[in-house]
Image: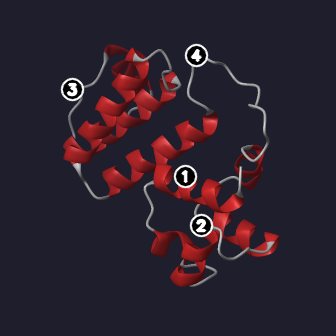
């Protein structure tokens, strides 16, 4: 897979704009051209962009391999899980309960399609919802036990 295409996919999964993705190291215009394959980006700058956006460079580059990485065919990749957590935290920081509801639907749909996220993703979503609402009414029993044992409720 080409770096530009992978950057675009990674950015979209992370829910970032081109401006947000590029802001640390390069101009939005240059970044846009990298995504489209018009310009190349040097490795140092690419790693700087990835790290600034909390994207693990090793996981990013592993997706450039032709063959699939060894992972469970029944779960989303750890990279996808990481992006989901970032979306959850970003929405929680904005106190956006509507967006958290949309993310819950996305998590539920992945489970219905036989490729669920790791169970801790649901815990993160439920904990963030609890944090915003100051209520444990809408969270699962497992997460309530976790919250009570950790004094979060």
Q: In which quarter of the image is residue 130?
A: top left
Disc 2 from disc 1: Cα separation: 9 Å
Q: Answer whether labels 3 and 2 touch (C-beta < 8 Å).
A: no
Q: Is residue 143 above or below residue 91?
A: above
- Residue under label 3: 138
Callout 3 environment at 10 Å: few (<14), some (14 to 19), or many (20+)? few
> Distance of mark 3 from mark 1, alpha carbons?
32 Å
Q: Residue at x 34, y 57 (%)?
A: 93
Q: Nearer the viewer's eye, disc 3 or disc 4?
A: 4
Screen quadrant of the C terminus: top left
Q: Are marks 3 and 1 in contact (CB under 8 Å)?
A: no
Callout 4 crowding tier (Cα within 10 Å): few <14, some 14–19, many ≥20: few
* Spot occupied by residue 2 in the image (x, y as percentages of width and height): 71, 56
Label 3 secondary element: loop
Q: Which residue is drawn at 63% across and 54% down?
A: 6
Q: Name the residue under label 2.
A: 35
Mark 3 or 4, nearer chain start? 4
Name the residue carrying label 1.
9
For marks 4 and 1, give the CA distance. Answer: 21 Å
Q: Is residue 133 above or below residue 35?
A: above
Label annotation for residue 88: none
Residue 86 visible here: yes
Residue 153 visible: no
As helix, strand or loop, the secondary structure at mark 4 comes to: loop
Q: Which of marks 2 and 1 is nearer the N terminus?
A: 1
């Amino acid at each position: 897979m080409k770096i530009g295409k992978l950057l675009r996919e990674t950015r979209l999964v992370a829910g970032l704009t081109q401006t947000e993705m590029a802001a640390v190291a390069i101009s939005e215009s240059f970044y846009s051209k990298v995504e489209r394959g018009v310009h190349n980006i040097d490795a140092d700058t690419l790693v700087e962009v990835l790290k600034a956006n909390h994207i693990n460079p090793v996981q990013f580059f592993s997706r450039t391999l032709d063959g699939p990485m060894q992972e469970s065919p029944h779960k989303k990749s750890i990279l996808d899980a990481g992006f989901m957590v970032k979306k959850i935290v970003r929405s929680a920081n904005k106190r956006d309960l509507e967006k958290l509801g949309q993310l819950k639907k996305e998590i539920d749909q992945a489970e219905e399609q036989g490729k669920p996220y790791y169970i801790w993703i649901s815990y993160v979503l439920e904990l963030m919802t609890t944090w915003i609402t100051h209520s444990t009414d809408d969270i699962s029993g497992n997460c309530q036990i976790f919250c009570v044992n950790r004094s979060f409720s």
